Amino acid sequence: MTSFSLDGKQQLIQGVFDEFVRRMEATGDAIHPSKTTAGDWWAGYITYGHDKVTPFEPEAAKRVALEMCLEAGVEIMLHTAFVDSVVVDGVMTHAIVANKSGLQAAPSAVFVDCSADGDVAARAGAPFELGRPEDGLMQPMTQFFRIRNVDDAAVQRYQHEHPEEFWPFQAIVEKAREEGKFPVPRKGVQLFRTMVPGVWRINTTRILGVDGTNGADITRAQIEGHFQVHALVEFFRENLPGLEDCVLLDTAAVVGVRETRRIIGEHVLDLRDLETGRHFDDVIALCGYPVDIHSPTSADGPFDDSDFKAANAYEIPYRSLVPLAVEQLLVAGRCLSSTHEALAAVRVMPPAFATGEAAGTAAALSATSGVSPREMNVADIQAQLLRQGAYLGPEPTYQAELA
Ligand SMILES: Cc1cc2nc3c(=O)[nH]c(=O)nc-3n(C[C@H](O)[C@H](O)[C@H](O)COP(=O)(O)OP(=O)(O)OC[C@H]3O[C@@H](n4cnc5c(N)ncnc54)[C@H](O)[C@@H]3O)c2cc1C
C-alpha cells in the first residue's frame, strides 16, 4: 500500500522503508512507488487509496531483511517463539522465548513489541482493546495466494473494456453472487499483478468471526482459508477472462490477520486525528493510506464507508508507541495504540515500517542514555529519525535539533 500522501504527491514514509525498497529495486525485484499509478495492474485496478503502491517479490524481501539486519549487527533468532514477559515492579526485564534449545530468558534494557498481536505487551500487563467497541468483533482474516499461467494481456484487455467497474471483473462476480455461485463471503475479487509475467497474487478469501489471539480460531481460519483458495481457483478458471488456464502457485505461509490487540498507550490515535490531519509535537511518522475496513460480519468492504475520510496526510505521535503501565517497553506496527477505525488505516506495511523505525530508534537512544522510553525527550528521537532519512512534515521544527 501507499507510502505517499493520498494525492500521491509527497512520499511520507522514507527512511528504512525507502532503503528496503531501493535494495529490492536494484535487483529488479521491486518497483519504487514513485513509478506506479492508481488504477494500474500493480494496484489491482483500484484507484481510491491505491496510488503509489510498491510491487515486490517476497523472496527478495526475505533476502533484503536478512542483509540489512546482519549489516546492522543484529543477533537474529529464527524459529523462536515469544512465550512470556518478566516484569519486576512494573519494569519489563526479560522476554521468555522457546525454540529447539528449549526455554530461554532474554534480558534487555528496552523491548519493542512488533508481534502485530501485541503478545509481549499483553503478557507484560499493558492494557489493550480487542475488536470494535460495539461487539468486540475484528476485521476478517484472508489467506493470500498466488496463481500462475494467467494471460496478462487478456486481463488487461477486460479491464480497459470495462472502465465503469470499480473493481476487477465486477459484473461477472456480482452476477455469480446473485446466483449463489461465488464461493466466498466477499463482495469482489482483488488481484494484483506480480513482477513475474503470468503470476498474480489474490486477496479474496474471507474468514469471518475469528480471533487471531486464539489458537483454536487461527487454526480454524487457516484450514478454512485453504479450502476457500481451491474453490476460488476453480471459480476463476470457469468464469474470468484471462484466468481460464490459471493454476495455483502457492499460498501465503500463514493466514493473514488484519486486526487483533490494540495496546493502549499514552495517546490513542483516533479517527478525528486522521480526519483533521492533527499535528502532534511528538510526531514520529506521517501516513496517507485511508481507513480500510473489511466488514467483520459481511461481504462488504474495503472502502464502503464514506463516513471515514482520512486527511491527505496525517501524523502518528510517539505517545502511541508508549504503552501504559509497563516501563522499558515500546510497541510498533499493527499493535500500536489506536482505535478500531484508525488502526484500519495505519495497519498496512509502510506505516508499520515507519513506526518500527521510530520505536527502534527510541529504544536505542533509551538504552544508551539510560532514560526510560516514557521519559525521553522526543526531539532527540525526531532528530535521529531525520538523520536517518525519515520525513516528519514540510516544516520540521525539529530541524533545530539537528544543528
Ligand atoms: C490479507 C491481508 C492483505 C494485506 N495486504 C496488504 C497490502 O497489500 N499492502 C500493505 O501494505 N499491507 C497489507 N496488509 C497489512 C499488512 O500486511 C500488516 O498489517 C502488516 O504487515 C503489519 O506489520 P507488523 O510489522 O505490525 O506485523 P507483521 O508483519 O504481521 O509481523 C509480525 C511478526 O511477528 C511474528 N510474531 C508474532 N507473534 C509472535 C510470537 N509470539 N513469537 C515470535 N514471533 C511472533 C510474526 O511471525 C511476524 O513475523 C494486509 C494484511 C492482510 C491480513
Image (spheres, helix red, strand yellow):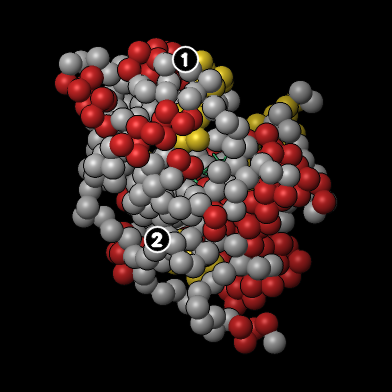
Q: Is residue 265 above or below residue 118?
A: below
| Disc 2 crowd, CA 10 A, few/some/many (<14, 14-19, 20+) | many
- Which residue is more in the foreground, 333 or 37? 37
Picture quadrant where residue 387 is located = bottom right
Query: Residue 34 location in percent, x, y?
Result: 54, 58
Instruction: Classify residue 237 as left or right of residue 115.
Output: left
> Which residue is label 1 attached to?
245
**Which comes before the other along the chain, label 2 or label 1?**
2
- In the rendered structure, which amino acid carries the disc numbered 2? Leu
283 left or right of 300? right
Label 2 near ligand 1 (CB < 8 Å): no
Amino acid tagged 1: Asp
For the C terminus, the image quarter is bottom right
Q: In the depicted view, which residue is nearer to us: 250 or 214?
A: 250
In three-dimensional space, the C-alpha distance between marks 2 and 1, rounded to whole angstroms, equals 36 Å
| Among the 4 quarters of the image, the one containing residue 381 | bottom right
Q: Which mark is residue 6?
A: 2
Q: From this viewpoint, is residue 374 visible?
A: yes
Whole-percent x and y of residue 12? Answer: 51, 65
User: Front-most of 313 and 101?
Assistant: 313
The answer to whether 63 appears left or right of 302 in the picture is right
